[in-house]
Image (cartoon, grey):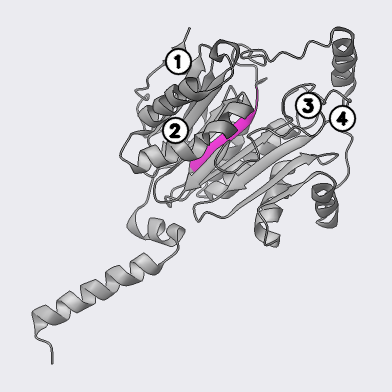
């Protein structure tokens, strides 16, 4: 019979082995609790507040990011996401979106038409199919079979702007094209990452893509590892800007792997931007890249290629005003916390 010290050792070893066998989310919940944090690209105050309301009520980070992205997706005045999004050069609004949780479960839709909330379709792909991504007509068919309604996403304003674009055929991307001054909420791609009070990380990303793009073009927003990546034991990252570069460098995955190697979120974002600048075949002076990261402790950071990338972060009342690299240019009180708007530091300018 084992002696007491040997028996205690065996019990401890068994407990460690059982913990290691748990899914990532269960390990995370077992080893920690956290204060909620949510962070989103651009000045998405409405989206972030919707997500924050889920988090501050003790809800799941995955539910929070989905609820948050419903806000811009349904806003006809937001011309880069969902309803009212700018169409492709053929005048058709096509949407891209993905979602990912702390257990590496993920779902995605690309080039989907006529569906108001692609982020929710992406979640259905994750939860109801053995696949990660559905595209085009197949994604729309799946959405309709799941009970989503067909919706005309091309508003009169977006159609008029498209017809005016046809006259000039100016197809060059513009840096920070969607930016507006606080508190307006127009922006580019909406990426959001969050951690809840149980320490569970999740993220989501949604966009109507590059305005007047070639039909069939897909950017980084629905690509797991490019526009979004989540590892429940390490952290999460999301991206906005010139999607081709995010795909080329696997930007979100790169950030999370740099955090796995010991970097803080801020430094991981900066190194990813520096790498992007070194390797891109595109003139870096003509494009934007804005990257955000959040680790498993709730620490966050953001960095951009060019001046002008703004992000918003929601923190609980118990937090002091965050010490960030960049500049806090706005704040608004929300239930149980504060949303801060931050001008991210940048590489070129």
Distance from disc 4 to disc 2, alpha carbons, whole Å, reads 38 Å
Nearest to the eye among marks 3 and 1: give it. Answer: 1
Distance from disc 1 to disc 4, alpha carbons, whole Å, reads 34 Å
Q: Position of residue 163 (x, y in %)?
A: 90, 14
**Residue position for label 1:** 346
Nearest to the eye among marks 1 and 2: give it. Answer: 1
Distance from disc 3 to disc 4, alpha carbons, whole Å, reads 10 Å
Check contact, mark 3 vs mark 4: CB within 8 A: no
Distance from disc 3 to disc 1, alpha carbons, whole Å, reads 27 Å
Check contact, mark 1 vs mark 4: CB within 8 A: no
Q: Which of 104/119 is in front? A: 104
Q: Quadrant of residue 263?
A: top left
Left or right of residue 278: residue 226: right
Residue at x-position 45% and y-position 63%: 23
Q: Which of 50/309 is in front? A: 309
Segment colored magenta: 188-194
**Residue position for label 2:** 315
Disc 3 is placed on an element classified as loop
């Amino acid at each position: 019979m084992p002696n007491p010290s040997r028996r205690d050792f065996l019990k401890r070893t068994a407990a460690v082995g059982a913990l290691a066998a748990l899914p990532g989310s269960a390990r995370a919940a077992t080893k920690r609790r956290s204060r909620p944090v949510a962070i989103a690209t651009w000045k998405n105050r409405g989206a972030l507040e919707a997500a924050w309301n889920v988090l501050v009520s003790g809800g799941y980070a995955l539910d929070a990011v989905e609820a948050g992205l419903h806000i811009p997706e349904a806003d006809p005045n937001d011309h880069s996401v969902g309803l009212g999004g700018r169409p492709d050069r053929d005048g058709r609004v096509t949407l891209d979106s993905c979602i990912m949780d702390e257990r590496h479960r993920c779902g995605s839709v690309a080039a989907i038409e006529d569906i108001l909330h692609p982020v929710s379709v992406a979640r259905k792909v994750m939860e109801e199919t053995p696949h990660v991504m559905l595209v085009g007509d197949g994604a729309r068919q799946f959405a309709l079979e799941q009970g989503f309604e067909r919706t005309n996403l091309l508003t009169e304003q977006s159609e008029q702007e498209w017809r005016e674009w046809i006259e000039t055929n100016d197809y060059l991307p513009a840096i920070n094209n969607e930016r507006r001054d606080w508190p307006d909420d127009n922006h580019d791609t909406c990426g959001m990452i969050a951690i809840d009070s149980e320490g569970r990380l999740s993220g989501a990303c949604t966009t109507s893509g590059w305005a007047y793009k070639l039909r069939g073009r897909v950017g980084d927003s629905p690509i797991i590892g490019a526009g979004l990546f989540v590892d429940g034991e390490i952290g999460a990252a999301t991206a906005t800007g010139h999607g081709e570069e995010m795909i080329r460098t696997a930007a979100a995955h790169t950030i999370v792997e740099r955090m796995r190697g010991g970097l803080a979120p801020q430094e991981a974002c900066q190194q990813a931007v520096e790498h992007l600048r070194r390797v891109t075949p595109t003139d870096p002076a003509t494009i934007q890249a804005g990257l955000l990261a959040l680790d498993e402790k709730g620490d966050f950071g953001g960095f951009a290629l060019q001046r002008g990338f703004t992000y918003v972060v929601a923190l609980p009342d118990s937090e002091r005003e965050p010490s960030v690299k960049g500049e806090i240019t706005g704040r608004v009180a929300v239930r149980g916390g504060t949303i801060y708007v931050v001008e991210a530091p940048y590489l070129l300018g």
